[in-house]
Image: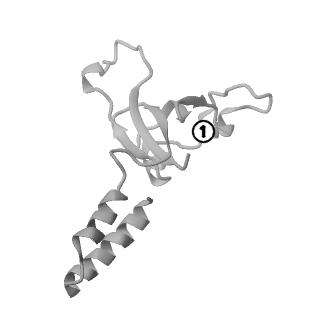
Amino acid sequence: MTTPSVRRQLEQCLEQLERGALTPQRLRQVIDQLPNGSPGGSQDLLFLNAKGTALDSELLGFTHYRAGRPVAMPDQLDPDGAVTDDGRAWPYRSVTEAIEDGWRLIGFPNAALMMDDSTTYGLGFEFVLEKWSDG
């Protein structure tokens, strides 16, 4: 059951409750249609590596997984099909842009791994985002 459908069903239950017409059986029907723990469909993950911990920090790189498999986004490929590191071609310039496009932030950078100016290793600050798609 989709979120709008669940909401609609719950609104109907609320109206029935206000009229004194809500039965335990009707409420059980709606409860039985609720998802068990995770949304239906498959989970897409987006790992965004940024220059800082702010959501509007410039991105250094990203990786996209669809249903557990790595995906090269079309904007990541040059005309010959090779992955490009040209950030201008990436679909997002910041974590904020990904959130505005419907990605949900589920993981923040680990502050214990912060680098100082004299030590450069790793690939910046990693944010983890998710989207759920139908199947």
Q: Which residue is depicted at the point 47% across and 42% down? A: 94
Where's residue 97, x and y in %?
48, 49
Q: Which residue is depicted at the point 44% across and 59% down? A: 1
Q: Is residue 113 above or below residue 70?
A: above
- In terms of depth relative to the viewer, which is nearer, 76 or 132? 132
The residue beneath circle 1 is: 90
Is residue 55 visible to us here?
A: no
At mark 1, the secondary structure is: loop
Quarter assignment of residue 115: top left
Quarter assignment of residue 129: top left
- In terms of depth relative to the viewer, which is nearer, 42 or 58? 42
Where's residue 55, x and y in %?
37, 43
Where's residue 41, x and y in %?
50, 46
Q: Which residue is depicted at the point 59% across and 43% down? A: 91
Q: Quadrant of the C terminus?
A: top right
The image's colour scheme reads one colour
Is residue 72 visible to us here?
A: yes
- In terms of depth relative to the viewer, which is nearer, 99 or 123? 99
Where's residue 31, x and y in %?
30, 60
Furthest-front residue in this view? 25
Q: Which residue is depicted at the point 60% across and 39% down? A: 90
Q: Label 1 neighbourhood size at 10 Å, few (<14), some (14-19), many (20+)?
A: some
